[in-house]
Image (cartoon, rainbow, N blue to C red):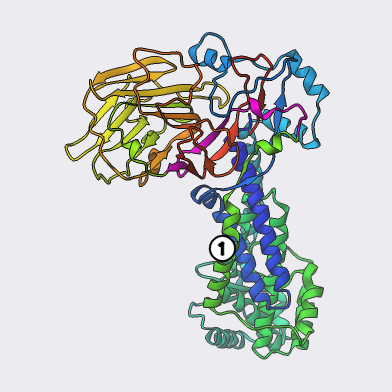
Amino acid sequence: MISPLHLEIIGILISSILISCVGYTMLTILREKTAALRFQVLMGLFLVLLALPALHNLLPVAQVPLFQIAKYIDTGEEPYTHPRTLVRVSQSVRDAITGDEPIPTAGSSADAVEKSHPGPWWRTGTHALETVSPWLLFGVWLAGALTVLTIQLVRWTGAGFIAEMATSFGRDRDATPVDSNAVTGIAATIKQEMGIDAAVPVLKSELAAVSMVWGLINPCVILPAEADEWAGDKIEAVLRHEFSHIGRRDNLSQIIAVLTCSFYWINPFVWLALRRFHFEREVACDDSVINAGVLSSSYAKHLMEITMQLNGPKSQSMVPAIMAHSSDLKRRLKLALDPATRRTPMSGAMKAVWIVMLLLLTIPLSTVRLWTTEADADQIFERFDPNLSDFDLRFNGTHSYVEVPHAPEFNFQDDFTLEMIVNVANLSTSGQDQLLLTKHRSHVTDGGEWAWSIMGPPNQVGRMQFSVWSEEGGATAESFDGAVQESGDHCADWQTLAFCYEKSTGNWEFFVNGVSAGSGTDDLPIGAATRSVNIGWEENEPWHNFKGWIRALRISDTCRYSGGYDAGAVWSNDAGTLALYDFSDGTGNVLSDVSGNGHDGTIFNCLWDACQVPTEDSNWGRIKTLY
């Protein structure tokens, strides 16, 4: 089965591609605007992508239906159709959870059908993905990310070596028209005009092919050794360009861009964005020089002369901000000479506005999750029968839940029974209790609220608990320790849980798969709280929410069981049923109450899922979704 880690990796990749497309669309819209603005859009794009993994897990889920992928196993018998108002537990699942026999798996007949039903082209690739460990995928990604970072660090080290070997700018040649005092004076004037307070030494190096800026906290400008022979106007143009990089903090921006590319190295759009990022950065600095009064024709001439010297070391070309890059020179010269080019600089406020705008456009794309719909499934194989489907909801353990509006009958003034068919995905995380059903808001007690949960560490793992909070202090009923087991397979290890209470005697009892898991006698003072009933979570306490799958739920106003019962029997919609959810919707954000009592629930951030199994009356086979 494709694991949640598979889906997480694929989901983040898809989100990054969608966000990149939004960024490129904005660049197209802004093609007539200034380079500084386009650069800021790219900077915002990199920031959003760096925050994407956190946004992907913290924000509410946007359930976008994609496709259903299934394995089709046919034994030649006709499927059994059951009414929507009944919940049947398959014989295979009952046997699996009671330990009588293992759940059936695909055999030779499955292989034969697999060959006869090859399915669409993407099915083979998805089956191949299913066989690949998610940790192997993570390892491949990590290796690529470290490779990108290593290459950048080598280049950065080379640039640092150039800076370390650089010397003060001085007059070493007789033909030098500019001495060190003149260079210092030009640099001081430019710093004052740009409002740069830090001391920025101007150095030269035999190893530098072109001028460059090195350093984040204490930056310096490094010129090639040939700068000794440059004229004063050329020195000024070059220094204005490099000081523009310092004023814009372009070396810091470069580090953010490189980190983004290392994280999303598999996304080709990110590399295209990096190339565009370099270009717009240099054009923005060119615009700054021309805005300061340097003639565009003179500047273009200086730019061409400097770039023609790119025959030396180029290790500095990726990390430090530099004045020239030969591959983009033709476009930069054209823009520098074009009088129609817009060169207006951006204020800090405008930069913030554009980043916020990009966030507003792209954050919704970070909530995309892969999920499936039953409607898509029956388009894959002609013999898919939706009546065989046992749908369920996947809860992520943080902010996924179902809310059922308040109804007086859920205040249980007499006998009641709570029943669920569940598959618990996590009982091992410290502090991660599993809330099944609750009419309580954490840290708020109006009197008489109740909650049904499964305990995790540091409590006794797997212990069920039914708690009531009241003005008199409330009460708690608890099952045996370890009554509920953590599952390692979504499509197996389903457990039927129940809690019964008899008001007249005060007797209560827990059940797991029809077997008693603890009983006692106590007064459970449930009051008249007007809160909604929540499935899978407790408001104000997201770290105690349910993580796993829920397949069916019934709430009754009678105590149905005592001592033990047949957990595989059909759940009937009788007079004692207050609410019955058979999870047959399979899509949408409404969990239908099929009892006819109108207690429909609203689904928040859950994913529809399914493990297709035969009912107890059929050996037809099963269709197991890969998710």
- Check disc 1: other Cα within 10 Å, few if <14, some if 14-19, many if 20+: some
Whether residue 394 is in magenta: the answer is: yes
Residue 359 seen in the current view:
yes
137 and 422: which is toward the camera: 422
The quadrant of the image that shows the C terminus is top right
Whether residue 472 sits left or right of residue 53 in the image: it is left
Q: Which residues are magenta?
A: 380-404
Work out whether 268 lies above or below 75: below
Residue extending furthest front?
Answer: 575
Q: Secondary structure at mark 1?
A: helix
Q: To which quarter of the image does residue 138 belong?
A: top right
Which residue lies at the image location 41% right of the left edge and 13% below the top edge? 565
Count all numbered tags in the image, as a single digit: 1
Residue 176: x and y in percent read 70, 85
Q: Residue at x 50, y 11 (%)?
A: 99
Front-most of 85 and 176? 85
Of residues 327 and 490, which is closer to you in this image?
Answer: 490
Tell me which residue sits at (39%, 26%) in the image. 576
Residue 491 lies in quadrant: top right
Give amino acid for label 1: Leu
Q: Is residue 164 visible?
A: no
Q: Quadrant of the N terminus?
A: top right
- 28 or 600: nearer the eye? 600
Image check: 517 left or right of 196?
left
The percent coordinates of residue 620 (x first, y second) are 69, 16
Instruction: List the residue tagged with mark 1.
Output: 359
Q: Is residue 508 left or right of residue 103?
A: left
Q: Is residue 311 magenta?
A: no
In the picture, residue 4 is in which quadrant?
top right
